[in-house]
Image: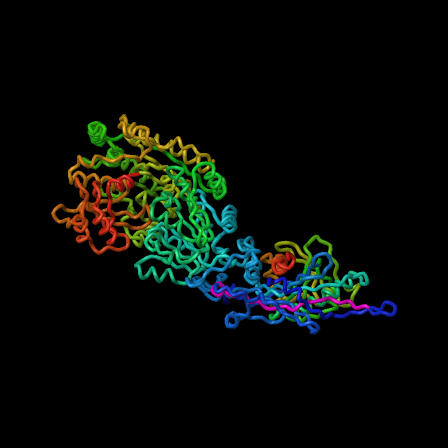
Amino acid sequence: MAIPFRDTDELADIGAAAYLTIIPWSEGKGFEGALFLVNARGEPLEFTYNRVETPYGFLWRKDDIRRHAHRRLAASILSTCPVTPKLVLCLADEVASELFCEDIELPMPVGRIAPGGRVASFASDSVSPRCEVREATESPDPVNLFWFPAPPADSTSERQLVGELARRGLLLEPFDRAKGGLDEVYRDYEGA
Amino acid sequence: MSLGTWWRLRDPSAIEQGRWLGFFRWHLSVRQVFAKRVFIPTPQDIAPAVSLGTKPSVVLPGATVSAMPRCLSPTSLTAQVGSRTDECAGSVAVSDLPFDEPTSGGRRFAQAPPACSEKGTLAQRPSADAGVPIWKRLACVLQIPPDLLLSPQGPLEWPAELFPFQEDGIRALYERDALLLADDMGLGKTVQAIGALRLLVHQRQVESALVVTPAGLVSQWWRELRRWAPELRISVVRGRADERAWKWRAPAHVFVTSYETLRSDSTANPASPPRRREWGVVVLDEAQKIKNPDTEASRKCKQLRRRRAWALTGTPLENSVDDLASILEFVTPLREGGEAAKAQLGAALLERHRAVQLRRKKADVLPQLPPKTVNQLALSLGAEQRMSYDRAEQQGVVELKDRGETLRIAHVLELITRLKQICNFCPSSGRSAKLEDIQDRLATLKAEGHRTIIFSQFTDETFGCRAVAEALADYHPLTYTGDMSSSERDHIIREFKENQEHQALVLSLRAGGQGLNLQEASYVFHFDRWWNPAVERQAEDRSHRLGQRFPVHVYKYVCEGTIEERIEQILRDKQLLFEDLVDDVSIDIGKRLTHEELFGLFNLTPPAALRSAPLGEKGDPDYSAMTGEEFERYLKRFLESKGWHVVTTPRTRDGGIDLIARRDDDVGAEITLYVQCKNLSSPCGVDGVRELNGSLPKHGPGSRGVVACPSGFTSDATAWAQDRGLLLWDRERLRELSD
């Protein structure tokens, strides 16, 4: 029987993970978002971003504005990114579950991440027919992952990718980089 | 127009979501913008620096536009390189810089961005400066942070686990443009520098780095770079001039060269290879090599244009605060058109020192490192050796006294050297009290399986390394001296590490006292003493460093009732100075060696002309009182006292060359001097200089012809010698050398 081994170069072939971040743009003016693709080692591959301006909304509930803006922003970013990732990750604090459960459908698993110990809402089967599946990881930092439509199956490249990212502490860190990128691209404008 | 400004030209179209309010329908709309695509090229392609992604996308009023974000993408570099104004709707891409150059280690490790060729100028560091295109900034901002790169889980694989203090050192080097890393010897300064270089290259902040190191350590740097940053391309610049010229042009991330090569290849021409480009980092290993600001090597290191300047040394202070000032002059970035900084003594120097130095002591950061015990062994000379010593000292002192007011420092140093040699070996019988002690100890150490390194400042067969090695033949010793070629020296070190049969390695202090890793030995002997405690400590720490598994025992010999005992006191004082300044950063210049101290070794009073003056001023011997042969002998002893291995040529067949002096340190390479001694009463003319030039062998880069004539040279002779690269040593130059 052959000695089992793993060539680390194979990591590059697992595919890319996309980190979607959507954050408010100063004081209710709108939202800006980015889709940041990294490989299994955390090396940057793609960065797609956009910004939407929302109207003064006394006529609209804030949640309606947010949901609509998120939907348009995500759609625009996803339609532009030239690489198809194996999975999409976003922060549960930033992106509500309805975005990918109801508004936008993606062919790959979408995981909303909440750091362990933090309260996060998710679409459970008791409130929605399109529910997310909760999964907890421990290494190296505990996080909760809410997958839609389902977590990556075992022995798939998607699962391997999640495992590598978790092992390297890369489930949350790329969001910081993505925000840093957004800050960098829009800083000129803010300062103007 | 800046990147953000074009945002104002936003899309007026709205995405509708309506709500009826009475008779009116209100629309919820979000406004979006066109996006564009910016590509992040490789470092080579950054060089032309055309802003590729900052053109505004103008949206005509009334046009219907779908959501168009921007995307930065590295996808197909080759395709992108072809289209420099690569703009496409709605996307900005951020690079993965294509890693397409596998090097050593295959593709097991992460790959570095393609190396920058000499033709490429360097990319700007990312900053908020308006002039830096967004794609360049994003290329850095989106890279993996250094903490993650350093962690074992990160994408970079490290061949061994880094100690926390080493990670701190790497972070400090990474974050700061100027740093004097003055860790104790053996804490891994090389590894820290390589680690930081690796991060900077991966972060696209540095595209080319220059490492300048003593010649004997070039191979070691190459090995460490291969081990700790296998994906980086290395160009080792050494060899023949044409080979070096090619290597300077080679595309590489890291160029490694020696001080001597840098001195040769960096000329007054700003387009000379080392000066042609602005280096992302210049690293000076064993930076005490530039302690003297007046040496050529020192000046040329400081001329290098550099964005970051790192100096690595465990002994930033060897003799005086001037050493430190010279090193600090280097530890300052030097941009194009900038002037090299001049360090001032005093409070400003202290402040600068505090600001740029990072120093950790072994005891603080590596409590698990086996302890080092220093034992000073006082030996009594045997009867014959004592007799020889006493006779030589008495005669020497009488000669010194006879010189009266013509007595100079050089005479005293010469006597000290002679007496130290006799303390090593009796010139008449060849007996040695030190050797007998070592032989006794080695017998025990061999039985216990310990190995030994022995340092001596002399290399010859009578008093130095070769004599020691010959006497210890039973232990199969190896000898490592500066007159060996670098490949011979590499072979010796490899042989000692790999072959347990060699129980001892006898090294010349100057050639083997720094940079080497000799953890295989845990016993260190100083066969004779050096003036400088920092140099001795450097030598000891070849063994007492990371990787050492056994306690290290250092033995220093002092022969009772000899000059060595008296020197010991001076060493102790200097040790205090070193610790005061480097470790506690307080300066007390009052502890510098004075003439009184030196002459006092022989109970002599310095001549009036020298009294109370700092060492080295006006210390000329009376050349006019010397015959030609005496001058030749004087120069031989003088060069030997400076660490040269000197051979006198046969008088009848010298062909104009009186002395051949060799050594390989000081600037870190092998140097051979062919010296013609002329002690004339009037300045030496062209004929005298021409005589030497005609008899010089065909010399390589490390060989120089020297004409020494204290009475000076005519202007014709000076011009003639300059054209042919000959060195002329007049009284002034000899005085400088003695300093």
Q: Nearer the viewer, residue B559 or A96?
A: A96
**Quarter the N terminus of chain B occupies:** bottom right
Residue B652 visible in the picture: yes
- Please indicate whether residue B521 sits to the left or right of residue B682 in the image: right
User: Residue lying farthest front?
Assistant: B715
- Please indicate whether residue B661 sits to the left or right of residue A166 in the image: left
Q: Which residues are magenta?
A: B26-46
Residue B185 visible in the picture: no
User: Residue lying farthest bottom?
Assistant: B63
Q: Nearer the viewer, residue B588 or B200?
A: B588
Residue B289, compared with residue B411, is above or below; it is below
Residue B51, compared with residue B582, is above or below; it is below
The image quarter in which residue A19 lies? bottom right
**Quarter the C terminus of chain B occupies:** top left
The image quarter in which residue B600 lies? top left
Query: Is B27 a magenta residue?
Result: yes
- Please indicate whether residue B574 sits to the left or right of residue B203 in the image: left
Residue B553, compared with residue B15, is above or below; it is above
Query: Is B555 a magenta residue?
Result: no
